[in-house]
Amino acid sequence: MNKLAIQTDRLELRLIEMVDLKVIHQLHCIPETDEFNTLGIPESIEETRQIIEPWIKANNTREITNYTFAIQHKADDKFIGLFGLRLGAKKYKRAEIWYKLDIGYWNKGLATEVVKEVLNYGFNVLGLHRIEAGCAVANLGSAKVMEKVGMTQEGRKRQILPLKSGWSDSFEYAILESDVRH
């Protein structure tokens, strides 16, 4: 079992485990957190189990290439979301990030705090050159987070995200190890 943990002032990221099944299922069932997510609301906790089993297996490999973290709020030790960091081929020294926070923790600077720390981990510990992320064009909160941490909007992919509301365009963001991080 990998014991990797990333700390910020208010948050701790730790690799998810099967004991997180119930809280992850609850997060996935919140309509507001599902609005811009392609996963959809699971029909049952068993469906959530099938989704996270490969994530947990990936977290427990000797050389992790697809990290899935639980975000814990230190003040109350409460699970508040998920954060993913998926590495690309080693040659390119590139990764993609994604995150999903419980609506009760939106607009408190927590997503910005956690993204900053994972960027630092990616560049300083993993030695990455480039980290990418995307979001539905209507997901203004997520776009603001990426801009606040110094990511650059590089483009827009047309109708790539199958959301409940229909096909959505996606803003594509990236930051390089040499870019200024905020």
Image (tube, rainbow, N blue to C red):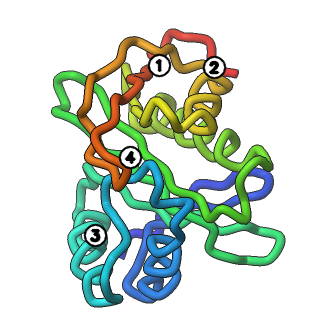
**Disc 1 to disc 2, how far (Cα)?**
8 Å
Identify residue type, mark 2: Arg
**Disc 3 to disc 2, how far (Cα)?**
30 Å
Q: Which mark is residue 181?
A: 2
Q: Which mark is residue 117?
A: none
> x, y (%) of residue 8?
71, 51
Give the crowd class for mark 1: few <14, some 14-19, many >=20 residues within 10 Å. Answer: many
Q: Is residue 16 left or right of residue 63?
A: right
Q: Is residue 132 left or right of residue 87?
A: right
Closest to the observer, 80 or 136: 136
Q: Is residue 88 left or right of residue 174?
A: left
**Disc 3 to disc 4, how far (Cα)?**
14 Å
49 w.r.t. 108: above or below = below
Q: Secondary structure at mark 4?
A: strand
> x, y (%) of residue 13?
57, 60
Q: Quadrant of the N terminus?
A: bottom left
Q: Secondary structure at mark 2?
A: loop
153 w.r.t. 52: above or below = above
Q: Is residue 23 left or right of residue 144?
A: left
78 w.r.t. 98: above or below = below
Q: Work out whether mark 3 precedes mark 2 in sequence or the reverse, and give the earlier one.
A: 3
Q: Residue at x 50, y 14 (%)?
A: 152
Q: Provide the residue designation for mark 3.
A: 60
Q: Residue at x 62, y 12 (%)?
A: 180
Q: Residue at x 54, y 10 (%)?
A: 179
Q: Work out whether mark 4 precedes mark 2 in sequence or the reverse, and give the earlier one.
A: 4
Find out whether the residues at labels 3 and 4 contact each other: C-beta distance under 8 Å. no
Q: Nearer the viewer, mark 3 or mark 4?
A: 4
Q: Which mark is residue 85?
A: 4
Q: Work out whether mark 3 precedes mark 4 in sequence or the reverse, and give the earlier one.
A: 3
Identify residue type, mark 3: Asn
